[in-house]
Image (cartoon, grey):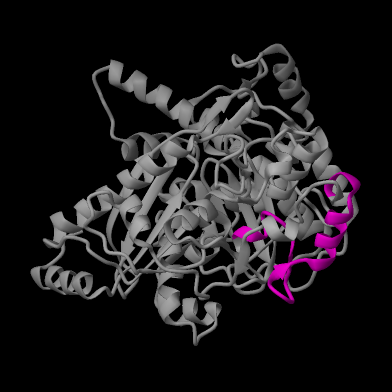
Amino acid sequence: MAVSNDDIAFIAQSIRSGKTALGIEFGSTRIKAVLIDEHYQTIAAGDHEWENHLVDGVWTYPLDEVWSGLQDAYAKMAHDVESAYGEKLTRVGSLGFSAMMHGYLAFDKNDTLLVPFRTWRNSMTRQAQEELSHLFQYNIPERYSIAHLYQAVLKGEEHVPNVAFFTTLAGYVHWQLTGQKVLGVGDASGMFPIDPATKQYNADFIDKFNALPKVAAQPWNVRDILPTPLVAGQDAGTLTPEGAKLLDPSGTLQAGIRLAPPEGDAGTGMVATNSVRVRTGNVSAGTSIFAMVVLEKPLERLHPEVDLVTTPAGDMAGMSHANNFTSDLNAWVRLFGEFSELTGHKLDAGTLYGTLFNAAIAPDTDANAGGLLNYCFYSGEFLAGLEEGRPVFARGPESRMSLGNFMRAQLFSAFSPVKIGMDIMTKDEGVAVDSLVGHGGIFTTPKVAQKILAAAFNTPIKVMATAAEGGAWGMAVLADYLQHTETPLDEYLDERVFAGAQAITETPDATDVAGFEDFFTRFSTGLDIERAAIKAIPLENN
């Protein structure tokens, strides 16, 4: 996008005067820093690619990679600022961090990490999940932080008596940069259930948890080792001199910047899609995928397939979360990219993805993917009853193998797990949805993923111009909200951030809906194929 000299001068002045907000999000495969101006336009960005590691059967990220990745993403964003506007980035108006929700980062009284970071992707807390869900009569998924803690208690892990504090990845980074052990209420709701009336941890559940015999035997009270929940706009501390140096080792960035409460990727996804009002929802698609709706009233029954979290303002939302989404899809796209390069035609990512994705909706592609079948499970998937995962592509001898059908099967497969929980909310519980917005990189290719998702949910899907910005942009908006707390968050988003925002809506096509339902029936019936693959294909680390 061409920027005039007047625009450059205006933005440079905004940077000098601190009329900016910076959001940094730790995604599963990318750490992204986004700087926005007072009109919510992205004026600079930087990112760093990283991958989780499977170590001794545990999905983890080493903490040194957290800091090296953060510093790299920030440095690239700061370089972008200097290159585009001739300004060294010495300060921003406000700052905020977000990250993958859930998981387990536990520290002792000396702030020493007790065990390697256990991410949301781990599915080894089944006993804790079942016992806590029964105890609370409230769904506690396997990836929730309290499930990780209680599973460690049940197993009698050596580190448990030494836990003085546990938090999420966003909470950890925020703590190190500000000294504040706090968490945005949305992220906190993925650690321990929140009472939407108080915006704090559910006091009754806290008491029930502490009364469990093996918990009562510990030297800590869970209330004392959890971070303090904060709603959007509350004071979450300032960047300390040590924190400024940790974020920007060059020493250019000044201390004293106000920080927003650190949020999870679900919360930033709601903000990025203007989906914090009751009866609005969004689908956030990345390495994992979740579909969520802000609820008018509590669900009538306990559903293990539906997680209950809150918006950054503390309102209850139902979420269908699938651990697996683009990992398998990306692997196949890379394979096609390698083939193209071998033929002497190296394609950029946009062309490669665009060509393959558009094949999935080409006129000669079968609505039901020609009978092809795919399972995108790199890791365990609670929604499908799988403790582990193996990516599998399968077809019968009469299936119609074509590039379009293959890519359609890939996309259908990616959206199938999350449909399980979404169907429970809309069909079983009668949850009403006024609007459903898609966001994430998969929507960068126009129409394709949007059309597939509309078929999967049989619901119109809106994609905004900010769809590819994702959570880092949403976190920057939450950081800016520190300056506008006199207005409720939903009104702030409607009246300031998204006023006049452009959006494209894709309505369900009846043929696509029927095709997806046919695929989904075969997908569900064929899960024994996935179970057999898990037994037959051992993990190398095991």
- In which quadrant of the rendered image does the C terminus lie? top right
Q: Specify whether residue 203 is painted magenta.
A: yes
Residue 281 falls in image quadrant: bottom right
- Given residues 121 and 392, the one toward you in this image is 121
What is the x, y in percent for residue 190?
67, 55
What is the x, y in percent for residue 140?
77, 50
265 left or right, relative to 80:
right
Q: Which residues are magenta?
A: 187-215
- Given residues 260 and 207, the one toward you in this image is 207
- Outermost residue toward the left? 5
Residue 389 falls in image quadrant: top right
Q: Is residue 526 visible in this depiction of the protein?
A: no
Please tell me which residue is depicted at 63% across the width and 40% down the height of the picture: 323
Indicate whether 289 appears above or below 436: above
What is the x, y in percent for residue 126?
80, 37
What is the x, y in percent for residue 493?
48, 76
Please tell me which residue is depicted at 50% across the width and 37% down the height of the picture: 360
332 left or right, relative to 420:
left
Please tell me which residue is depicted at 80% across the width and 44% down the height of the picture: 129
- Given residues 10 and 91, the one toward you in this image is 91
